[in-house]
Image (cartoon, rainbow, N blue to C red):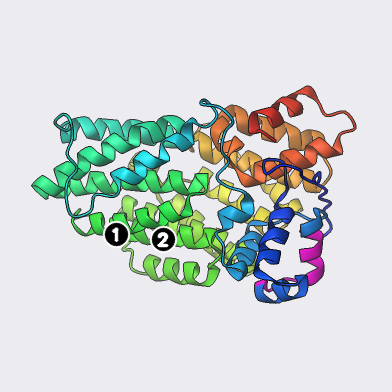
Amino acid sequence: MAGFDWNPEPATTPHSEHTGIRIARARNLRGFTQEGLAMRANVSRSLLAKVETGAKPATPSLVAAVARACAVDPAEINGQPYRGNDKNSDAVHATIPAIRMALAYVDIAPELDTPPRTLDELRTEITELRKLQKAASHARLGARLPAVLEELTVHAMETDAARAWRMLNRAQALAGSLARRLGYNDLAQVIVERTSVSAQYAEDEHLPCLVSLGRARLLMTLGAWDVSLKMIKKTAAKVDQGNPVSTEVFGSLHLSAAIAAARAGRAPEAWEHHGTASDAAARISPRDRRDPYGLQMNPQNAAIHGCAVAVELGDADEAIKLDRELDLGRRSVGGERRAHHDLDMSRVHLWTSDHDKSLKRILHAERIAPQMTRFHPSARETVRQLQRTYRKPPESLRLLGERMGI
């Protein structure tokens, strides 16, 4: 992404500071010089210096590499979790302690004030929770998850029924996805291990693969690209693509591998994985798509990931080309995925100095998935840069910054 300007306003408060300031703080706390950290993170000293001063963006791969070198969580470098200033803006974070408590029960069932709902009732509830996840309704999802986790834990512990374990695994996966998106990587790690246990008793051949996928995604967040890729490829090799569901799992593994390879700067490998995933998506007939795991493995999602690969590789021209070819008219992917694509393209248009298009895309992302947009590190950095580039920031941009608390 060399050559793109990035000049966030120097910060005076935690909410307004750019990522480079937090990198410099972590480096100083470890007693590293810029040259010393650059060597440990395998980046150039000049790039690190520009990132620290705000002259260059801190990409996800750089954040992860610096975090590993400084022995801190990448969420700390990103400034997560982004807490709100009042009850409404902080509502999603208020649910995290209850989720932690619900996941604390391992060998014993929680004692509930009332009997748990039936498995049929909880199945309906999980269906609703998945809709909330696809719509990136973080606060509502987080508020309803603790009760579901506790009730399913009671069913699983007291009956040892495979169905109860499967449903508990699905609820745990929803919690893990939420924790990772909000920057609670420690909690996400705990949840991955919980899903590993529940998958053992669920009598579902695909769940161990999805556990590996969840672990690989967390490793991607932490910057362990090589381990993540190795895990995904090993898991994908075990998937028998004898039915549409297996093919969905296989394709999803390769989509994640494509992003991991792109963040590692391995363009040929990234596009190879993306091609494999796209082929898998094309082989699934629309009438056979059931998507029991919420993977959204279809040609539209594969195409969105193609744009994401180009973005992670810093190829603005390819990202813009693929975006023009993208057709999401049938709403085959959820709001969160579509909004994330808008955030990616907002970054690209910012790189190419098309500030109006950049603003348009990030505002569109917020309309689709407001909570996801406001809590996304890249979105917040993009807003900071847009605020600086306009001589007189548009009212829509000013209000967006207020909603983000920056």
Residue ID at (76%, 43%): 12
Is 397 covered by the magenta stretch? no
Q: Which mark is residue 97?
A: none
Q: In this view of the protein, can residue 276 be seen by the observer?
A: no
Please determine whether, in this image, residue 166 is positioned above or below residue 402. Answer: below
Residue in front for this viewpoint, 166 or 251? 166
Residue ID at (47%, 34%): 92
Which three-letter amino acid code belongs to the residue tagged 2?
Arg
Looking at the image, the residue that sits furthest to the top is 395
Question: Range of the magenta residues?
Answer: 41-51
Residue in front for this viewpoint, 41 or 312? 41
Please determine whether, in this image, residue 212 is positioned above or below residue 119. Answer: below
**Quarter containing the N terminus:** bottom right
- The kind of secondary structure the magenta stretch mainly shows is helix
Is 47 covered by the magenta stretch? yes
Q: Is residue 247 left or right of residue 63?
A: left
Q: In which image quadrant can residue 120 be found?
A: top left
Residue in front for this viewpoint, 86 or 345? 86
Which three-letter amino acid code belongs to the residue tagged 1?
Ser
Q: Tell me whether circle 1 and circle 2 mark residues in contact (CB < 8 Å).
A: yes
Please determine whether, in this image, residue 329 is positioned above or below residue 10. Answer: above
Residue ID at (51%, 54%): 278
Residue at the disc numbered 1: 196
Q: In the rendering, at what x and y percent does residue 102 appear?
A: 29, 43
Mark 1 closeness class: few <14, some 14–19, many ≥20 residues within 10 Å: some
Looking at the image, the residue that sits furthest to the right is 391
Residue at the disc numbered 2: 215
Residues at marks 1 and 2, CA–CA distance in whole angstroms: 10 Å
**Quarter containing the C terminus:** top right
Q: In the rendering, at what x and y percent does residue 327 appear?
A: 59, 37
